[in-house]
Image (cartoon, grey):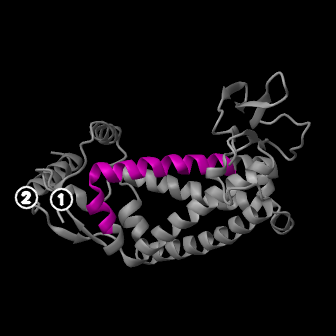
Amino acid sequence: MNESLAGEVRVAARRKSAPSGEVIYRHRLVTRVTHWINLLCFAVLLLSGLQILNAHPALYWGQYGADDDRAVIEFSAYADDNGDVAGGLTRIGPLTLKTTGVLGASRDSDGALVARGAPAWATLPSYQDLATGRRWHFFFAWLFVLNGLVYVIAGLVTRHFKRDLLPTPAELAPRHLLRDIWDHARLRLPKGEAARRYNVLQKLAYLGAILLLTTMVLTGLTMSPGVNAAAPVLLDLFGGRQSARTLHFLSANLLVAFVVVHVAMVFVAGPINEIRSMITGRYRLPSNDGSEDRS
């Protein structure tokens, strides 16, 4: 029996013998605090970022981006025969979609359809105010950076990254990955002993989120003229300020997708148990009979 197979046999045996409903200490205090601060920062950064995007709802690639340049992503409105706003359009490269009510054109407080990159309910503040949006964005961006530094330092000191987030070679084996993907597709989540630690898909998702958050910080800095003067290497790294702006936007959208999937999995796994563990640190191991959400 090879080592990999023997390891799987041991894990299977532990799953069968895992105490039903055992409560474990899953999340350290620093992980819980930085998690909730990250959530607050991301929400404000997303809403204020859309406010900033509304000032010029077009994204470019390269060093320059002006009205005469061809945008790679653009949110715009089209008019009817009377010249009134009739709807909104989102163009991504050669593909154009009607996105009336969400992107390009949405209704104002009076119910009138107006040209607007992102709707009022998705921006901070809700009315058009670039200066205020930038203040919100910059304040919470620096709070996010400081919070991230605390998380990274704590993760290195406590070996959280190596112990909990770094996949093992066995977990990255195609057979193991495919089995985990198939189990998640059928909503068959880990139970008992297997629920003590992150599975490989969780590890890869969290590492991907950390990479996206790092990309957002670096591309955000690249858009600053002051940072460009102090660290011009960022311009070379991202191909210019306009490319950095586009990557900033795309990273934000991927993080939104991550949050949506993350929240969905929390509800599938048992919201009371999952949310409680991120507040108190205590997590009740899901038993094999599916009674994981007991209080």
Q: Is residue 252 visible?
A: yes
Q: Which residue is mark 2?
A: 17
Per the image, label 2 sits on a secondary structure element best described as helix
User: Which residue: 71% across, 54% down?
Assistant: 51
Give the image location of residue 238, x and y in percent: 74, 51
Q: Is residue 135 left or right of residue 147?
A: right
Q: Is residue 37 left or right of residue 221?
A: left
User: Tag on residue 63?
Assistant: none
On-image quarter of the N terminus: top left
Nearer to me, 231 or 191:
191
Q: Is residue 238 visible?
A: no
Of labels 1 and 2, earlier in sequence is 2
> Which stretch did the figure color magenta?
248-277
Q: Which residue is mark 1?
A: 193
Per the image, label 1 sits on a secondary structure element best described as helix
Amino acid beneath label 1: Glu
The answer to if 205 sits in the magenta stretch is no
Report which quarter residue 132 is drawn in.
bottom right
Vertically, is 51 above or below 39? above
The answer to if 272 sits in the magenta stretch is yes
Give the image location of residue 127, x and y in percent: 72, 56
Vertically, is 269 above or below 61? below
User: Which residue: 18% across, 57% down?
Assistant: 292
User: Which residue: 26% across, 55% down?
Assistant: 270
On-image quarter of the C terminus: bottom left
